[in-house]
Each structure stands twice: as C-alpha cells, then as structure tokens.
Amino acid sequence: MTSKASLRDLDDAEFRARYDSDRFTTTLLGNRMRYIVEHMSAGILTNTFSLILRDWYDFNATISGPPEQNYPMPAVGNSLAAFFGTMSEAVRNTVEEYGPDELAPGDVLIANDPYRVGNHVNDMCFIRPVFVEGRIVSFVTIRAHQLDMGGIVPAGFSSTKHNVYETGLSLPPLLLYRDDRPVKSTFNLILDNSRFGPIIVPDMRTIHQSLRLGERLIQESIERYGLDAYLGAIRYAVDASAESMAAAIRELPDGVYSAEEFVDADGVDDSVEYRVRVSLTKVDDRLEIDFSGSSPQARTCINASVLDTKSAVVMALKFLIDPASPYTSGAFRSVDMVLPAGTLLSATPPDGAVFMYWEATQPVICAIFRALEPALGERAVGGDYGSLGIHNANGVLPNGTPWVGTAQCGAEHGPWGATRHGDADSYQVFYQANSLDPATEAIESDIPAVVLRKEYVIDSAGVGTHRGGAAVRKDTLYLADAEHWTSPLSTKRAAGIGVHGGGDGGRSAAWLFPPGATDVAKRGDLVGTDDSVYSSTTPVAGVLDPQTKTLDAGGEYFYFASNPVWRTDPGAMFRYQTNGGGGWGDPLERDPQRVLVDVRDEYFSVGYAAEKFGVVVLGDPHADPEGLRVDEAATESRRGELRAAR
C-alpha cells in the first residue's frame, strides 16, 4: 500500500481505467448499495412476527459481488456487526459448495452451519443471486435469527449444550426457493425440527420478499448506469475501505502488543477458566494478530468459529482506529490472523459446539482494546459490559400454548466505555451489535412476565475524566411455571476496563428471588436494592459474599450453570446486574461541575464522588437535587490528598 498512489491521487482517466466509471457515478452507486440494504432491512423490521427480529433487530442485510470478483462485499446493513463481519465468507462458502453454475434466477440458497458460515444455527443465511442477461452479477443476502431451530433447548440460548447434535438443526447449502417457488422438502426439513413453525414460515416469506426487493433495486441500478459501472463501484467501495484501514494501521507505532482476557467457565462445571491470548505485531501498514496460546475449545457451546473471531477482530479495529469509513470486506485486507484449530476461538465439530459464540469473541475485542492501549494513548476506548447474560425462558400457558422469551429479560443491554470524546452511554448492546431494546409492553404481551425494573446502578460506572456507562439492573417477575437458562459469563472480572488512566466499571451478577419476595398486584411494592434484600436469594452468577449474597470482589464465585435449568413456580423473580463501562482519563481531572451533575443524576453518590473524584458535594441529592453545590475549597484540598497518595 505504501508504494501505491492513494485513490484520491488518481486522476480522472486513471480512475475510469481502474473502475470503469467516473468518480461521481461510482460514489453514487456505492451510496445506492448502502441504501438498498437498509431498504431490505426496513421490510424485515416492520413485517416479521418473531420477537427476535421484530423487537431485537437480530438480522443484517449485505450485498456481494459475483464469483469472478471472489465475492467482495461492498455494503452492509447497520444492525448486528457480528453478522456482517462473517457474511462475505458465508456467501463465498455457501455458493461455492452448492455450485454457482447450479443457480438460476429466482433461487434462494440457505445455510446455517456455524463452521461454514459463522454465528450459530439459528442465524440462517438467505442468499439470492442477481442475474443480468443470464449472468450472476451480484448476490443479496440476509442473515436472520430464526426463533427456534430445534436442539435440546427451546429457542436455543444456553451455554450447557455439549455438541453439535444438541445445538439444533445444522444445514449445508440448500435451496429454499427455486424460481421463486418454495422448495417443499427444505421447508419440511426445517419445520419438522422447529418448535415455532407458525412464526418461522411467515418470517421466511418476508425475508424472501426483501431479497426480491434488493434484487430489483440492483437490476434497476445496472439498467440505469451500466453493468461495468456497477461492478466497478463494488471494487471501489472495497478498495476504499481497505485503504482506509491500512492508513489507520500505518499511524500506529510499529511493535508487538499483547494482552489476555478470560471467560469465567463453560456449562460443564467451574473447574476451567478459558483464556483468550492475543499478540499483535504491527509493521508499516500491516497487522498480524496471533491467538496462539488461547485455551482449547470448551466442553460446551460457548465456543466461536474462525469466522466469528475474524469478525470480532475487524470490529475492534474499526472501533479503535478506523471508525469513520463504511465497513466492507476490504477492511481485513491489511490484517493477517494466526489462529490454530481447535481453540475456544476456532472450534471444530462435533464436540467443539458453537452457539454462544459472542461470549468467546467479546473477550477478543476487550483483549485488543487492552493490548493497543499503550499505542493509542488518548485514542484508547474503554471496555463495555462484556457478556450479554442472555436469559432464555419457556413454558406452557394454561390453554396449552407454548411460549418462549429469549434475549429480553436478562443482562442483554448495558453500558459502553468512555472515550476521549466524552462520557459513555449506559444502555446499549455490546460492541458487536446494534440491536433494539424490546419494549416492555411487547415483552409482557408475548410472555407471562412483568418487567418490574430497568434502572442504572449508582457507583457502578468506571471513573475518569470521562466516565463509563453505569451498570443496568433489571428485575423480571414470572407469572407462570417456567424453565430458565441463563448465561452470565463475565462476572469474575470487570469487563468494562478503564483506559488512559480511567477506572474499571463495576462487576455483574444475577440472583433468583423466591415466590413471594414481591407481590406487585397486592402491595404495589418492588424488591428493594439495598444489601439486606439478597440474603434470601439464590445466587445465579457473580462474585458474592457467601453469607449476604451481595457483590464482593473478595467473595466466592457463584457458577452460572450450577443449576443447568432453573425451574420456577409463579411469582419467582430474576434480577440481573450488568458490568459497568470503563472510564477514560484521570478522574481527578474531571470538571467538578460534571461530577455534581453525576451526583444529582445518581450516577455517583456523594461519598463516591469524594472518594474517587476528590469532589466534595454539599446537599441532599434526594430531597433537594437542584440545591446541590460543590465545596470548592474542600474539593481542592481533597484532590491534593489523593494526588499525594499516588
């Protein structure tokens, strides 16, 4: 890259010779491709029935180029990054295995095998070839989470499945539609193995129509601007992305940077803690990322595939050094990855089961954040809350109707880490996603549960010149008998790492309150949040005081799968608390007036403000929040004491 002229330096003739079009048309077509994938996504978001698609945005749409271009991916949707990071290889692997010459107009090809296409079996790829004059010129693809694909756990979310036969139906490349007519044998295969066919079938029909829309919009673009210009625009979008990442890598100091992160345990027992070890070697505009020394593949399905790990690597680099340019498959061109087979990050079947893959790849992102912090300096980014802590519940209503609630009532949403630009938000999805938060009303209409509380936890955000996001506390009361699978896999350590002198965020945990702990209908009260309420609970996960069951960094680790399936009676309540987000910069440099606002808004208590920030706040944040003020003399004295103690 260093010896080549940049794309900006190409004159008009050189640009046209390389991309078969002028700059304006090429840029227009690139923007139009991004519009197409968003238009496809809008149809899914507004027309599907599954809660995981309708309420969570758990899908993504992409465009790929033809086989002779090696399937470059110039445009992706704006939802799950964990999806589009694997999609270019997913399209190539699926189409090449099936045979591009076997495809015809009106076909939709599917595959969901994690080792072929990445992610897990519920995340099915729907791939449609786009033909012009009898030739494949592009592919439109949607990866969409299907509510259930069989296996031993309804809806699939559990860290306790031991092999690929337990995770659910795994499909090689198969035709779902031929000439826009359903392939009955494929539909029957899926529906014979799924618990929620009446939801999956209309969702697949919606996806089919969204793919047809994408195909039509691409064909219209080619009709207007020409095939050569369209294919040139694909090449240009990918080249521009590659050049942007290479330039960002070049700005890093040459050197070797290493770090480790961990996953608490797998679903067998708590005897094994899993290590993610990363070593980054940077030379000029190239980066090698070596995962040698990472733990062998886990005994249950917390593993990731090679494609999932590659996706996490690119996401980390986009966050840290190249956040502005659009993502394409070119973003990985200047990056080499060393990843031995059979590790937590490169599992192989049948025993290296892949389902909760993000629990292995989130530590990849955090390890890269930690490793590159010395090189980035003030550009470092704080860690987020780490684990989705997904709660998966199911049961049967009195009328015999089965129900399932998944990724709604656990620790799925939480804080991000701070940056040099400012404080972090406290209610997002982790760094590999861009999902929606299901509305409380939608949750309560779908499952027999009441969401009693969603709130921030005081004194949980990582301190700094800019604070991390606060931990999120969520209480859910179940009104019927239920089975629960829960997966908080990042409770032993603070996932929200502080950077550039900032502090780590608070730790996460989960508890089960017995029936009768709260009776909202009769008494109208909620379970409190003070330490006294936890003694009667059953700890689900976290490092806790064994007597009081409260968070205690020096306490006992409570293993998330000590009870693989939690079976509860009506009235039981689960409480989840996420990790806090990491802070950025020296907390003693935070403007005292900003600390005052934090105390007023209950991000921090009066005592915590004095202890961590050296800011003495006078007044009562509960009785008179607008009457709070900073004691400037006492603050100056307190900050002097804290600096001297360093």
Image: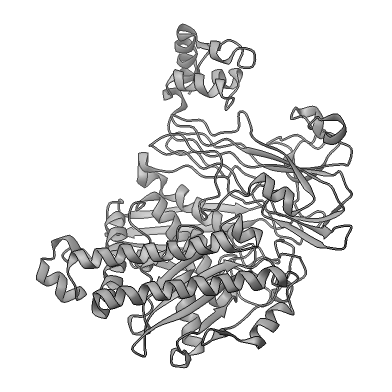
Q: Where is 504 relative to 24, above or below? A: above
- Left or right: 251 as drawn, with respect to 20: right
Q: Where is 223 relative to 467, above or below? A: below
Q: Is residue 404 in view from this perspective?
A: yes
Q: Where is residue 21 shown, x and y percent of the image?
A: 19, 73
Q: Where is residue 15 shown, x and y percent of the image?
A: 15, 70
Please tell me in which quadrant of the rendered image residue 521 appears: top right
Between 61 and 89, the one lying in front of the other is 61
Q: Where is residue 98 shown, x and y percent of the image?
A: 51, 88
Q: Residue at x 77, y 69 (%)?
A: 152
- Left or right: 69 as drawn, with respect to 506: left
Please tell me in which quadrant of the rendered image residue 116 appears: bottom right
Quadrant housing the N terminus: bottom left
Please tell me in which quadrant of the rendered image residue 415 appears: top right
Q: Is residue 342 in view from this perspective?
A: no
Q: Where is 420 relative to 273, above or below? A: above
Between 123 and 479, the one lying in front of the other is 479
Q: Residue at x 76, y 70 (%)?
A: 195
- Left or right: 364 as drawn, with respect to 372: right
Between 491 and 131, the one lying in front of the other is 131
Q: Give the colouring mode of the picture.
A: one colour
Q: Where is residue 574 shown, x and y percent of the image?
A: 77, 44
